């Protein structure tokens, strides 16, 4: 069975797949650049995680994981509106299941960043939502959430 970190990332992908604006253009890796056909789209990945032994149960780790959800859209006159719509749809989806189907103790949006850049010849807008996800595992079993 996979690490709970992977299960959390996959659950976020599931929650964010099929949203009105980004549809099925949801990717769980940031290794590949998105093409124009992939926009608007989402890229979901994990970044930092801290772990501490639980004070209630020394054989349990309390973990805080940063899950990043990046929304990409082609720049046009409505780019900020499009990024705000993507943000609303993602926030609503995660907010409807903050325990991530029982894999997390809680999740919370901790930051939102918006930037504009050029990839190739096309200017794009990027929305970056960072969620802090609290979850627990046994020290001897990182594949089962506690």
Image (cartoon, grey):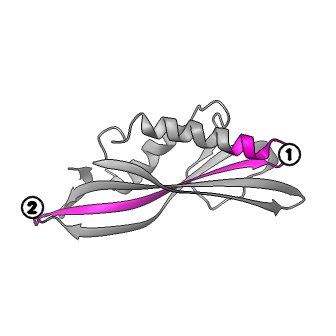
Magenta stretch encompasses residue 56:
yes
Residue sitting at x 22%, y 57%: 137
**Helix, strand, or loop for circle 2?**
loop
**Helix, strand, or loop for circle 1?**
loop
Q: In the image shown, does 11 or 111 lie closer to the viewer?
A: 111
Per the rendering, the mark at residue 90 is none
Q: Which residue is mark 2?
A: 57
Residue sitting at x 54%, y 39%: 16
The answer to whether residue 42 of the structure is visible from this angle is yes
The answer to whether residue 39 of the structure is visible from this angle is no
Task: Report the span colored magenta.
Answer: 55-83
> Mark 1, residues whose alpha carbon is within 10 Å: few (<14), some, or many (≥20)?
few
Residue sitting at x 33%, y 53%: 4
Q: Which residue is mark 1?
A: 76
Say above or below: 116 vs 18: below
Task: Decide if residue 69 is on the left or right side of residue 109.
Answer: right
Magenta stretch encompasses residue 2:
no
- Coordinates of residue 56 in the picture (x, y in percent): 9, 61
């Amino acid at each position: 069975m996979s690490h709970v970190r992977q299960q959390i990332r996959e659950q976020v992908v599931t929650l964010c797949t099929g949203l009105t604006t980004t549809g099925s253009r949801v990717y769980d890796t940031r290794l590949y650049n998105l093409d124009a056909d992939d926009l608007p789209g989402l890229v979901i990945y994990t970044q930092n995680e801290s772990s501490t032994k639980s004070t209630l149960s020394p054989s349990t780790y309390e973990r805080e994981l940063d899950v990043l959800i990046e929304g990409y859209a082609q720049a046009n006159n409505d780019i900020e509106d499009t990024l705000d719509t993507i943000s609303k749809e993602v926030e609503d989806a995660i907010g409807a299941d903050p325990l991530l189907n029982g894999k997390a103790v809680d999740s919370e949006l901790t930051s939102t960043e918006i930037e504009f850049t050029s990839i190739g010849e096309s200017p794009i807008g990027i929305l970056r939502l960072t969620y802090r996800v609290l979850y627990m595992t046994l020290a001897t079993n990182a594949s089962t959430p506690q």
